Image: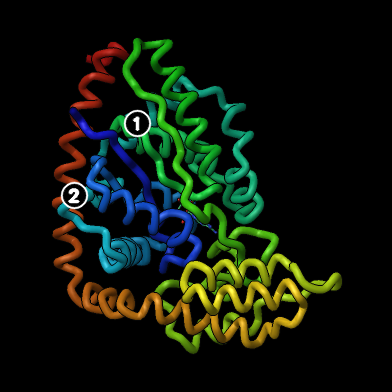
Amino acid sequence: MAKPIILSGIQPTGNFHVGNYLGAVRNWLRLQDSGQYEMYILIPDLHSLTGELASDERRRLMVTAAAELLALGLDPDKVTIFVQSHVPEHAELAWIFNCITPVAELYRMTQFKDKAERQEKNINTGLLTYPILQAADILLYRATVIPVGQDQVQHVELTRDIARWFNRRFGQYFPEPEHLLSAVPKVMSLLYPEKKMSKSHGPESVIELADEPEIIENKLKKAPTATAGGSGSPGAQNLLLLLEHFGDTGAYAGFAAAEQDGSIRYGELKQAVAAAVSGFFAGFRERRLELMADPGRVEQILEQGANRARHKAAETMAEVRRLAGLR
Ligand code: AMP
């Protein structure tokens, strides 16, 4: 029997952070190793055009993103890892989906509202239609399992709607995908712990997986932990969560109990978190540097991935074109 298909992606906006890891990548590794799925992981360079990256930077970040995914343990023999624009069918399917999606649905998307606020001088059309391209990313592979963080759930719901609208208008073809959350669907920002961790709040608000130990320590020093009301602040909860997932159980239990009874010393908690996170990713940092020193090898893996992805995409588009009366 054919295996269920998984698709997910991660933007080439720079180094990945612990939110990406706990919210998405860790789940991908688990799913890859289960052997139960046919799996596609894409690096969405077309999506990144909605932001303001320079072209050279985009090219560089693409290789960095792929190197980081490989260094984290994604295995190109088990997972198709590829760059979105290497498979032109993504843009073609997105156009067809543009023509069946009411524009009002796009204005409702919270990510659009957030991003439009952040780049108010560049509210381009791509920023609005971004979730349509994302629906095309998913449905091009007829994926049904979409492992993402909490912030992507609304887009997966829209993808289901788009599949339904297409099927109603042109004939039953697309499956309706479901999101799959990890155990930690939302890691909070270091500096603004009421908000999700995101590069958009500045480099000091995220712990990057590639950060050296002293950088992590310095970032954590600036992270707010206490609130006027005493313990239980979102900042402290977030640090405890990082310790729970990257540290050993004993250390976490000790700090969690101290947080409960009010005896916690946040300076010590921060040191423990810094040691845990930097220790957890020490091997990753080494593998990443090796891969970054050999971009030709990374590009070759991406090319192999694109070849596999193109094969699947071509099958889907042949059927879509037939159903839509384009051929
Ligand atoms: P992006 O950087 O937006 O491409 O995100 C890649 C993946 O990481 C997506 O599945 C997101 O849902 C997930 N993600 C991003 N930020 C966080 C966060 N702060 N906490 C948990 N998951 C996140």
Residue 326 rendering spot, x and y as whole percentages = 27, 15
Which residue is tagged 1?
139
Give the quarter of the image for residue 142. Answer: top left
Determine whether the beta carbon of the residue marked 1 sits less than 8 angstroms from the nearest atom of ligand 1: no
Residue 23 rendering spot, x and y as whole percentages = 48, 55
Residue at image coords 21%, 14%:
327
Residue at image coords 67%, 74%:
257
Determine whether the beta carbon of the residue marked 2 sits less than 8 angstroms from the nearest atom of ligand 1: no
| Left or right: residue 178 compared with residue 306 | right
Residue at image coords 39%, 53%:
27
- Residue 305, label in figure: 2
Residue 12 rendering spot, x and y as whole percentages = 38, 59
| Left or right: residue 320 compared with residue 125 | left
Residue 231 rendering spot, x and y as whole percentages = 77, 72
- Camera-side residue of 63 and 176: 176
Q: Report the Cα–Cα distance between label 1 and label 2.
A: 17 Å
Sequence-first tag of 1 and 2: 1
Residue 45 appears in the figure = no
